[in-house]
Image (tube, helix red, strand yellow):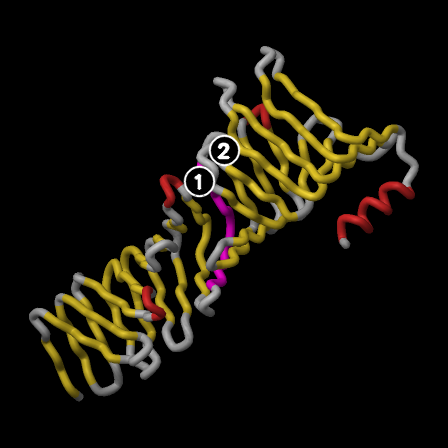
């Protein structure tokens, strides 16, 4: 319905030229194919960018191998020759992996071999929705870079706040990775990590990197390093094989390993345990 109304608005505006089944191939000064554009309908105007509907853009690298394929309901061709998407866009990489995102500004920079957005981007994953302040992706890469402040909303209700997130789908993997300070929040648990996060969405494992602080439901604070959160089988188990320190109003415990079930709220501290009870 949105596409129909948009197309009707375009028809009501005076256009210079209309082309059905539009096809365009653009080459560099060295006659290297940069990209092809196919669209169901093309409208050109005197003082506005060209509007195209039901669009497919194929990019090509320097060796003329097909790179990214972008499809969308609508796009614009600027006077500079850049392709400007302002709707939901599906991106298919060289190995056939699909990314879906929604943004009000996504530009194909064929000369630089990049697609880029400086506006808010909503990335639509299978098990999560991710909002960032921008994105970049090379045409011959399977890794997407979501820039600025990033918020991940998992379907399970868990949220993650971080910055500068890389999404990798190489060789069938689904990895979300950041090296920036990160906050993980579930129903009763908040986890802060100093050096970022590595989320494997296929096997539901989350690695919180560097120094980690866990704020547990009962009111205690658990400090450790390089904590793994196992979310498989609808669970939420935090594990670390590093020195761990739990402190509450009544107890102060140090150990070499820890295991915390965030659902049952059971904490196990193991290996050379030293406890002080107040």
Which quadrant would residue 203 be assigned to in this image? Answer: bottom left
* Labelled pair 1, 2 in contact (Cβ < 8 Å): yes
> Where is residue 259 drawn, in percent x and y?
21, 70
- Residue in the picture at 46% in, 48% down: 164
User: Which stretch appears magenta?
Assistant: 142-154
Q: Is residue 221 left or right of residue 37?
A: left
**Residue extending furthest top?**
30
Q: Would you place residue 126 above or below residue 53 in this image?
A: below
Q: Quadrant of the C terminus?
A: bottom left
Q: Is residue 259 left or right of residue 178?
A: left
What residue did someone put label 2 on? 138
Secondary structure predominantly adopted by residues drawn in magenta: strand
Q: Count residues near mark 1 (Cα–Cα under 10 Å), then give few for <14, some for 14-19, many for 20+.
A: some
Q: Which mark is residue 143?
A: 1
Does 151 lie within the magenta span?
A: yes
> Where is residue 10 drawn, in percent x and y?
85, 42
Q: Quadrant of the N terminus?
A: bottom right
- Residue in the picture at 47% in, 32% down: 94
Q: Earlier in the sequence, mark 1 or mark 2?
A: 2
């Amino acid at each position: 319905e949105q596409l129909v109304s948009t197309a009707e608005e375009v028809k009501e505006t005076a256009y210079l030229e209309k082309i059905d089944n539009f096809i365009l191939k653009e080459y560099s000064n060295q006659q290297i194919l940069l990209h092809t554009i196919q669209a169901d309908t093309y409208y050109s105007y005197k003082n506005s960018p060209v509007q195209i509907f039901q669009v497919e853009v194929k990019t090509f690298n320097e060796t003329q191998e097909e790179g990214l394929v972008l499809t969308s309901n609508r796009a614009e061709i600027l006077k500079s020759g850049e392709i400007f998407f302002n709707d939901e866009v599906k991106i298919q990489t060289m190995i056939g992996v699909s990314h879906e995102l929604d943004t009000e500004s996504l530009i194909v920079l064929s000369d630089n071999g990049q697609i880029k957005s400086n506006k808010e981007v909503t990335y639509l994953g299978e098990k999560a929705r991710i909002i960032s302040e921008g994105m970049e992706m090379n045409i011959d890469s399977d890794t997407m870079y979501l820039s600025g402040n990033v918020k991940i909303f998992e379907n399970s209700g868990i949220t993650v706040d971080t910055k500068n997130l890389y999404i990798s789908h190489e060789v069938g993997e689904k990895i979300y990775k950041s090296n920036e300070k990160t906050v993980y929040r579930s129903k009763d648990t908040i986890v802060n990590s100093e050096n970022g996060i590595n989320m494997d969405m296929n096997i539901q494992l989350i690695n919180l990197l560097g120094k980690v602080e866990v704020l547990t439901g009962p009111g205690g604070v658990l400090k450790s390093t390089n904590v793994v959160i196992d979310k498989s089988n609808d669970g939420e188990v935090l594990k670390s094989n590093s020195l761990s320190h739990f402190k509450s109003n009544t107890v102060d415990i140090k150990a070499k390993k820890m295991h915390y079930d965030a659902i049952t709220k059971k904490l196990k501290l193991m290996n050379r345990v030293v406890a002080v009870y107040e």
